[in-house]
Image (cartoon, coloured by chain):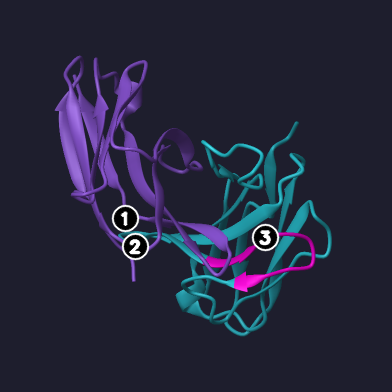
């Protein structure tokens, strides 16, 4: 089966840096996604890692270590609009198709 | 492009009633999915489809049926609604892996908020 863990809640200060961790145990690993979801809205894509290392995209970066089953999302220069839930999702292959298995999400609150 | 749309946006059902949720996408995507999202549970896959005329079960398929008669539409049916099916339902879609091999992003609809009393 699949098991994805991430902290339930985090709080950080505007302008600061925050790191959201995600650990996973899956079979048929084919990449890891991070999604952002504002309250009452749909998830939107942030980043994707399939190889080990860091992927940078503006203020957001995502890291993957496949051997450790570990990823993190790094948010720099936090803004109030970054208050949202951040979903870690692992892509797996099975029965000839690909699926995403999501963690329960980390609710980030950015305070002034 | 409208992307992924869902109807209705909100619905209240009584136990035992039936309904169909409609998902439509105009991106010519092969793959479509239905998820439910509950507090503290995250997104869980109900059913998915890898192409027109095909469907498959996800993690929590019981109590739901689906159909993909047209490539652009994916319907989720509840034959006899139960309070445990109170949730927010999201539809998502993506292209075949071969089209964007290095990036397999799912696009989500705005969600349907269903309450079963």
Instruction: Residue A104: give its label.
Output: 1
Q: Is residue B83 magenta?
A: no
Mark 2 nearby-residue class (10 Å; few <14, some 14–19, many ≥20): few
Residue B30 position, x and y percent, is 71, 51
Instruction: Report the chain holding disc 1.
Output: A
Residue drawn where x is 79% and y is 61% of the image: B52
Q: Are marks 2 and 1 in contact (CB under 8 Å)?
A: yes
Give the cyan chain's letter: B
Residue A95 position, x and y percent, is 55, 70
Q: Is the residue at mark 3 from the same chain as the one at mark 1?
A: no
Residue linked to disc 3: B50
Residue drawn where x is 63% and y is 51% of the image: B9
Instruction: Report the chain holding disc 3.
Output: B
Mark nearer the viewer, 3 or 1: 3
Residue linked to disc 2: B41
- Label 3: element kind: loop
Corner quadrant of residue B90: bottom right
Q: Is A77 above or below relative to B61?
A: above
Marks 3/1: CA–CA distance: 25 Å
């Amino acid at each position: 089966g699949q098991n994805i863990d991430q902290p339930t809640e985090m709080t950080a200060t505007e302008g600061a840096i925050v790191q959201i961790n995600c650990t996973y145990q899956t079979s048929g690993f084919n990449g890891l996604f991070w999604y952002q979801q504002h309250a009452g809205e749909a998830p939107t894509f942030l980043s994707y890692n399939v190889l080990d290392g860091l992927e940078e995209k503006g203020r957001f970066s995502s890291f993957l270590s496949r051997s450790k089953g570990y990823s993190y999302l790094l948010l720099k220069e936090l803004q109030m609009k970054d208050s949202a839930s951040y979903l870690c999702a692992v892509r797996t292959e099975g029965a000839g198709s690909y699926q995403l298995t999501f963690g329960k999400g980390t609710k980030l609150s950015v305070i002034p | 492009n409208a992307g992924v749309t869902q109807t209705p946006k909100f619905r209240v059902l009584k136990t035992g009633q039936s309904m169909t949720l409609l998902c439509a996408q105009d991106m010519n995507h092969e793959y479509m999915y239905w998820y439910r999202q509950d507090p503290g549970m995250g997104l869980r896959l109900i059913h998915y489809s890898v192409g027109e005329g095909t469907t498959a079960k996800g993690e929590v398929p019981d109590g739901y049926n689906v159909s993909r008669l047209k490539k652009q539409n994916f319907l989720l049916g509840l034959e006899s609604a139960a309070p445990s099916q109170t949730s927010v339902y999201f539809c998502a879609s993506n292209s075949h892996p071969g089209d964007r091999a290095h990036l397999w992003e799912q696009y989500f609809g705005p969600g349907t908020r269903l309450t079963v009393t």
